[in-house]
Amino acid sequence: MKAIGLTSFGNPGTFEEIDADLPDISDNQVLIEVKASSINPGDEPLRTGEIFKSSVGGQWSEKLPIILGSDVAGIVRAVGKKVTRLKVDDRVMGLAIHSGAYQDFVAVDEDHLAKLSEGISYEIAGAVPTITLTAKQALFDHGSLLKGQKVLIQGGAGGVGHVAVQLAKNHGAYVITTARKYNHDFVKALGADEVYDYTEFDIADKIHEKVDLVIDTVMEASIIENNGVLGKVGEKSLSLIKDNGKYVSIVSFGVNSYPMERNIKTYFFQSIPNYSDFDKIVNWIERKELKIHIDKNFSLSPQGIVDAYINSKKQPKKGRISVSKTQE
């Protein structure tokens, strides 16, 4: 089979079509014919090679080629002996955390997948798993968001951010978010109660009543350079949190050891894929309670992936960038 491998580090790096073996599946896995995936900003430090300069670089191998892409949507082509929920020809979406999705076929644990209805396209489904799972777990599993509380979502027009705004609003929270000025109408339409452009002024001067929870999705260059400590956005966020409030970051991987004042709880986490959460997410999408905005869709090919990563660095943008083999 064919795969699309990162063959040299850079921004966006070099991607080439390579030959790969058809994956073996374990008893609890299924073999998926890949139809779509997406571009994850979290891949950037690996794609550029910057990750190897930080304290977490050791978990990755510098040996090339590397197959990227964690989100996957496609068709089940084979099932393991202990698979019970899924069958051959099922349409599915989920996370390929053991191997990248930028290839013809990928083996994925059954519990890391959800079955798709015909009403959800592969293009949409390939953009869903990481951002929705992250937003759901950030708000509710780690943030313990309650109805009526105030939440500040940093980066409300981004992939995770635009999902978090919708989920928080649907949950009955008062939602404050940050976005560049040209995306204000977009995030307001998602349900944001207040929107501020942090590139124009200090949001601490605008938000006068402290919030119960901050969800920080803004990746700053200083975070990688300084081994995961808070960037300027994160520092500003802390000043806006109530005593005993919570700060949840999906970018500042060193924040769990960060000294906090006023009994503020800080969390950095990486989402844990599971069928239960994915099933909820699929139901939200089917019931139109959650909308995934695709900023642009590129072909799942070496040049398409390069173009997608280049585009991901440009403004204006909002929502998600997908890569797919189908334009359904």
Image (cartoon, rainbow, N blue to C red):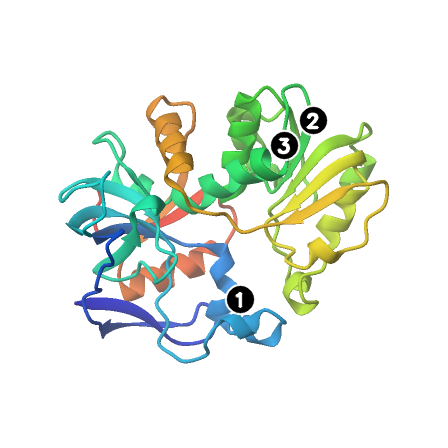
Nearer mark to the viewer, of 1 and 3:
3
Q: CA distance from mark 1 to mark 2?
A: 32 Å
Q: Which residue is mark 3?
A: 144
Q: Does 303 appear above or below 96?
A: below
Residue 115 point in image, percent of width and height: 26, 37
The secondary structure type at the circle numbered 2 is: strand
Mark linked to residue 150 = 2
Q: Does 39 appear above or below 3?
A: above
Tag 1: residue type?
Pro
Q: CA distance from mark 3 to mark 2?
A: 12 Å
The residue at the far front in this view is 82
The secondary structure type at the circle numbered 3 is: loop
Q: Residues within 10 Å of mark 3 (few under 14, many from 20)?
A: few
Q: CA distance from mark 1 to mark 3?
A: 30 Å
In the image, is 212 to the left or to the right of 190? right
Q: Residues within 10 Å of mark 1 (few under 14, many from 20)?
A: some
Q: Residue at x 85, y 45 (%)?
A: 261
Question: Which of 114 and 296 lies nearest the eye of the viewer?
Answer: 114
